[in-house]
Image: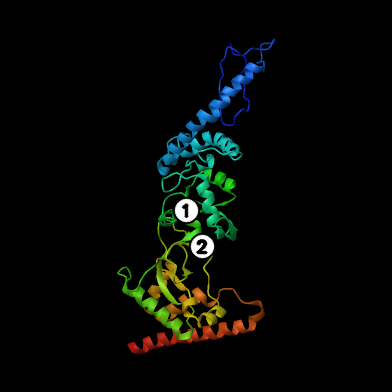
C-alpha cells in the first residue's frame, strides 16, 4: 500500500522511495505516522545518502569531467552533455560541499574532489582553483565592462590554446567553460575571467626571419630611422604576430611590451608612451618598452604598400598612430606638453618629407 506520495526537501538533489513494514499510516490513511520507526528509516536513508550516494556522486562527476570537453558539450542531447550532467548533480554536490565545510574527513572533504572539467582534460578541485585565485590576485581588464579591476581570478576558456597550456605548466588550473565556472567563483570569492580575453601573447618577429618579405623589412627600417631622427621613445619598434588560436588581439594595430616579456601578459591596455616617459627613459634605456606592430593588420599592410612609393609618409603615419597623441597630458603641464608635442611632430614631418624628397631626387 502506498501511504504517501509527494516531494519534501530531505536532501537537495536526491529523490528516494522507502518501503518498510514498520511504517504505519494515520487513521485517515493519507499520511505516515512520524514515530520512532519513521525516524529509524530516515536514519537509514541519511546513511545511504551521505555515505553510499556520496561516493557514487564523486565517481560520476569525475568520469564526466574526464570526458573530452568538445565531445561532451557538443552531445546530440543537451541532457547527455557535460552541462546537462552538471545540472543533474550540482544541487546534491552543493549540499554536500556546504555540509563538508563544517566538519573534516580523512579524504580532505568535498573541496579536494577533482570533479571539475579543465581545458587540459584532467579534472581539478575547488581547493586548487582557490589556491590559484589567491596566488594570482591582481589587476585585470574585465572584457565585459572593459574596466580594469582588482580581483582573485578564476581562469576558464572554451578550448585549449597556447596561453591555457602555459598557465597549466605554471600549475594554474584553467576550467572548461560551463555553468560550473560561476558556481566555483562564488565559492572561492573570485571573478570568472576568460583566459583568451584577458591575456595576450604576441610573438616578436626577428628582422632576419624568413617569414618577413623585403617590403616589410624595409618598412620597419624606415620607421626606426624616422623615430631615431627625432627622439626615440621605444627601445625598438618590431613586427609582431598577433594572430594565434584564441587570440583576442588579432584586430589590434600595436601593443607595447617590456624587454623581458617572454610569455603571456595580462591585457590591461596598450601602455602608450608619453612625452614625459620619453624624457625619463632616455636616461635609462632599459626602461623603454618594445613597440609591437601587428604585421597582419589591414592598416599595416596598407602602410607597407604606401611605403613602396612614399616611405616618409608611411613611416610618419605609423609613428603618428603609435605614440604622438596618447591623451595622457599632465594637468599641470599642458603648455609644456603641447610645446613638446608640436616640436616633436614638426621634426618628424620634416624628416619624413626629407626622406621622400631625397627619394624623388635620387630618381631624377
Which class describes the residues within 10 Å of circle 1: few (<14), some (14-19), or many (20+)?
Answer: many
Going 53% across and 72% down the picture, which residue do you hit?
A: 272
- Does residue 242 appear to the left or right of 362 in the view shown? right
Q: Nearer the viewer, mark 1 or mark 2?
A: 1
- Does residue 2 appear to the left or right of 203 in the view shown? right
* Residue identified by numbered label 2: 267
Occupied quadrant, residue 355: bottom left
> Front-most of 178 and 249?
178
Instruction: Provide the secondary structure element on which disc 1 rests.
Output: loop
Occupied quadrant, residue 96: top right
- Does residue 132 appear to the left or right of 236 in the view shown? right
> Front-most of 108 and 323?
108
- Does residue 41 appear to the left or right of 204 in the view shown? right
User: x%, y% of residue 75?
Assistant: 42, 38
Going 38% across and 88% down the picture, which residue do you hit?
A: 358
Instruction: Provide the secondary structure element on which disc 2 rests.
Output: loop
Going 55% across and 26% down the picture, which residue do you hit?
A: 47
Is 77 located above or below residue 320 in the figure? Answer: above
Any part of residue 353 in sight:
yes
Is 135 located above or below residue 327 in the figure? Answer: above
Numbered label attached to residue 279:
none
Any part of residue 179 in sight:
no
User: x%, y% of residue 44?
Assistant: 57, 22
> Front-most of 189 and 195?
189
CA distance for labels 1 and 2: 18 Å
* Residue identified by numbered label 1: 172
Name the quadrant of the N terminus. Answer: top right
Q: Earlier in the sequence, mark 1 or mark 2?
A: 1
User: x%, y% of residue 319?
Assistant: 47, 77
Amino acid at each position: 500500500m502506498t501511504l504517501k506520495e509527494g516531494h519534501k526537501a530531505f536532501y537537495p538533489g536526491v529523490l528516494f522511495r522507502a518501503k518498510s513494514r514498520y511504517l504505519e499510516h494515520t487513521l485517515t490513511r493519507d499520511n505516515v505516522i512520524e514515530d520512532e520507526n519513521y525516524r529509524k528509516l530516515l536514519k537509514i536513508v541519511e546513511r545511504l545518502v551521505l555515505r553510499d550516494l556520496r561516493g557514487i556522486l564523486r565517481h560520476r562527476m569525475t568520469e564526466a569531467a574526464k570526458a573530452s570537453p568538445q565531445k561532451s558539450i557538443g552531445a546530440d542531447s543537451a541532457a547527455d552533455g557535460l552541462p546537462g550532467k552538471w545540472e543533474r548533480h550540482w544541487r546534491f554536490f552543493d549540499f554536500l560541499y556546504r555540509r563538508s565545510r563544517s566538519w573534516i574527513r580523512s579524504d580532505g572533504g568535498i573541496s579536494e574532489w577533482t570533479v571539475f572539467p579543465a581545458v587540459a582534460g584532467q579534472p581539478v578541485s575547488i581547493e586548487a582553483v582557490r589556491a590559484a585565485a589567491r596566488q594570482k590576485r591582481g589587476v585585470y581588464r574585465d572584457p565585459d565592462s572593459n574596466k580594469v579591476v582588482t580581483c582573485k581570478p578564476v581562469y576558464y576558456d572554451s578550448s585549449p590554446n597556447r596561453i591555457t597550456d602555459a598557465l597549466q605548466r605554471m600549475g594554474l588550473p584553467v576550467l572548461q567553460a560551463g555553468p560550473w565556472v560561476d558556481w566555483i567563483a562564488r565559492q572561492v570569492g573570485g571573478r570568472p575571467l576568460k583566459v583568451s580575453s584577458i591575456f595576450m601573447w604576441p610573438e616578436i618577429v626577428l628582422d632576419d626571419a624568413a617569414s618577413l618579405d623585403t617590403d616589410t623589412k624595409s618598412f620597419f627600417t624606415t620607421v626606426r630611422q624616422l623615430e631615431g631622427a627625432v627622439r626615440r621613445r621605444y627601445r625598438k619598434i618590431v613586427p609582431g604576430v598577433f594572430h594565434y588560436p584564441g587570440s583576442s588581439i588579432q584586430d589590434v594595430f600595436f601593443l607595447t611590451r617590456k624587454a623581458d616579456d617572454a610569455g603571456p601578459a595580462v591585457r590591461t591596455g596598450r601602455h602608450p608612451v608619453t612625452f614625459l616617459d620619453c624624457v625619463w627613459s632616455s636616461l635609462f634605456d632599459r626602461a623603454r618598452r618594445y613597440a609591437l606592430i601587428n604585421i597582419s593588420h589591414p592598416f599595416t599592410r596598407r602602410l607597407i604598400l604606401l611605403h613602396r612609393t612614399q616611405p616618409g609618409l608611411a613611416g610618419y603615419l605609423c609613428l603618428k598612430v603609435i605614440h604622438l597623441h596618447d591623451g595622457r597630458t599632465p594637468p599641470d603641464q599642458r603648455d609644456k606638453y603641447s610645446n613638446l608635442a608640436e616640436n616633436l611632430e614638426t621634426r618628424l614631418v620634416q624628416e619624413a618629407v626629407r626622406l621622400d624628397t631625397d627619394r624623388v631626387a635620387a630618381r631624377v
